[in-house]
Amino acid sequence: MPGILAKAAAKAFPKSLWLYHCNSGACNGCDIEILNVLTPYYDVERFGLKLVGSPRHADVMLLSGAVTRPTLPLVKRAYEAMPAPKLVFGIGSCAAGGGCWFDTYNVAGGGATAVPVDYLIPGCPPRPEAIIYGVALALGLVPQKAAPVELKQVEFPIDAYLRNKAWEERNVIYKLIKD
Amino acid sequence: MSTNRIISSLRAEFGEAVRGSSSPAAGRLLVDLDRSRLREAARFLINRGGRYQVGVGADERDRTQTFGLIHFFAFDRERFSIGLRTAAPASDPTFDSITPDIPSAGWTEREFRDLLGMRFPGHPKPKKLITADDWPDGIYPLRKDVPYNLVPPSTADVAYQLDEAPPGTTIVPVGPFHATLHEPAHFAVYVDGETIKHCDYRGFMAHRGIEKLCQTQVSYNEVPFIAERICGICGSVHSVAYCQAVEMAAGLSISRRAEFIRVVCLELERLHSHLLLIGVAGHLIGFDTVFMHAWRIREQVMWLSEKMTGNRKTYGMVVIGGVRRDITPEMKDEIFAVLKNLEAEIASFHKAVAGDSSIHGRTKGVGKVPTEEVVLWSLLGPVARGRGVDIDARRDFPYAAYDEIAFDVPVTTDGDVWGTIVVRLLELFESIKIIRQALDKMPSGPVLTEYGEALPAFRTGWSIVEAPRGESFHYVLTGEENRPERWRVRAPTYTNLQGIPRMLRDNQFADFPIILGSIDPCFSCTDRVAVVDRRSGRKRVWTKSEMDRLSRSRS
């Protein structure tokens, strides 16, 4: 329902959007493209978008990278610190579904494992144009050109119940091996 | 000292404890050693001018019922690298710690304590490094009986196990969502007034278990694509280093043209990485004009990379056996045109930065480390070259096509943050020179040599590649199932970060971001296996914005 969200976003965020950039375990690729949209060629400040240092000042969280096991509680905490109404953008493949390491021992999954992600901007890394387009689309600054697509990766990340169950099953395997 | 002489002197010194030696390639040496003499042998090599590179631990219980450990040392002047290989029985994986003699080995030993359950009696700081503080004891993820996707449940609130504060100091926690670059890592800075006395690091939050993933799940030629994603900046560095290590282990030789194309990729990466860092350094001291200009100039390199490789980050280019895309004559002309423009822009940028008194004021005399201590901590890359240590893997351990290319290695003796910036500025011109030569000297021929048969198993290879931040080290032991048995990555930040407490000591707290920034830290590389603390309840908590404000208000 991006259409409705866009309308809601236009109402909730009529003025400049302040962005908080949260790296939950990314490889730097997406982070650099996020910084890149601030520099002279892309210059998003002309749309009133501004990167801020603290989540308490932010309207939008730009989440990059797979959420790793140690950063999971920290990302949640940063999200709680943001004043409502707030939006979360998952930037890049890792934030979408955990990327190529979505199930390794120190990775909790994609961005949605930690916080509700409203928009995903895919790519590895997404081009600066893609990031600007994604944000502009969410704000209703540009018309949507693509039809909604059902993403496979939406099935991931597993919710807490399944995760605990999977953990228990794995532990049984581990114990068997150990014995 | 040649490889033969070092072997004979090791044999003379340690006699029966040296069980054998082999040389998997020119300039590479492996010495099998009894584990009881490990610490003495390591000290022996350091005293003869060796530089500690990294240790590689492996679970070899299925083949030899042992845990293996190799410590690597580089002899930069003599152009060879030597590995001391030891093993301990599975029932008692204990090795003498070499950290009391070689401080830069500290993290290696802590890493294998976490990931393999090895023990290092005598280690000055036997604490967790890689795994989180709530990681359960007894689960060692790199051991073969632990599945790669075993995620232990975590606790909600994790208290970091940090050093005791030295008397008279206050702890300032910085991070994990962070002041310098946008990567998670926690620093506890111990200050006396405004002066930093000590610093403890709790990072490895972007540790994604890449080594385990690649040792258990994928095949040889899929690893380069994951290796590139260890780091979003030095992608080609990691894929080239991995591919060279596999090629060395398997004895594959690749076409000369492919080697030249690899050089072009690596140098393009150096260009955009150095511009990025100089821009970020400007940003950290509140001089955003430098940031904007550096990144404006940098953007041309990104566009060029995209035309050349299909991705803005030179991804998807390097595979085992060569590269995937050729440089066409039209592409070559275009690269020359961009380089010409770039050279002019960098020259005027260099002039502006080099003569700016406010940059001098913030970087000169900051983060000073004397040359002897740089050697002691095995610092790498521009961080070492800016402090008078003349090492560069491109010249000392020529790989790809660097042996045919003439270039200078800029070294300054300033010993401070300013020196590292000067070195990076000068290296930009060297990179342009290297790309021009590579394009001119490139012979014609195929770009990909496909290997037909399965690669031989249990051969060793290690490659050293000069990343923009310093030396990257990849070790590969080939395996039986069309994938590496063991793959170890050591990024330059892994070593340079260990020297950060030394660089910070007796500096002003407001200089913390620029000193940390000056090593061009890349936590994702370091953590491969990658500052918010608003609620920790410690004595004083700084948010990033406060930190930025403080940092900028000094200018």
Image (cartoon, coloured by chain):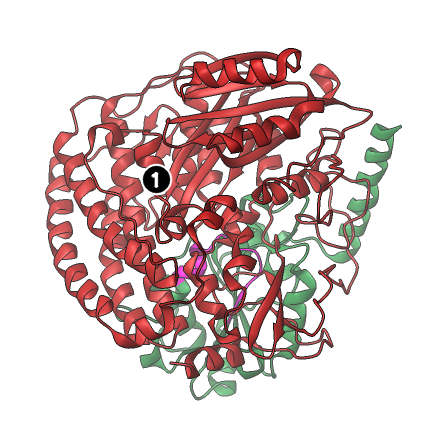
Label 1: which secondary element: loop
Relative image position of residue B140 (x, y in whole percent): 74, 38
Position of B265 relative to B2 (above/below) = below
Q: Is residue B1 magenta?
A: no
Considering the image in quadrants, where does the C terminus of chain B appear?
Answer: bottom left
Residue A146 appears in the figure? no
Residue A7 lies, with reference to residue B457, above or below; the image says below
Question: Which residue is painted at 28% across and 71% down in the image?
Answer: B290
Q: Residue at x 26, y 50 (%)?
A: B427
- Note the chain letter of the green one: A
Is there any visible trace of residue A16 in the rendered image? yes
**Residue drawn at point x = 45 percent, y = 88 percent:** A14
From the image, tell me which residue sits under label 1.
Answer: B392
Q: Colour of chain B?
A: red
Residue A29 forms part of the magenta stretch: yes
Tell which of A155 and B182 is nearer to you. B182
Q: What amino acid does circle 1 point to? A: Asp
**In the image: residue B193, left or right of residue B467:** right
Q: Quadrant of residue B288?
A: bottom left
Numbered range of the magenta stretch: A21-33
Q: Quadrant of residue B418?
A: bottom left
- How far across and down, in percent of the image, does residue B16 sit? 66, 11
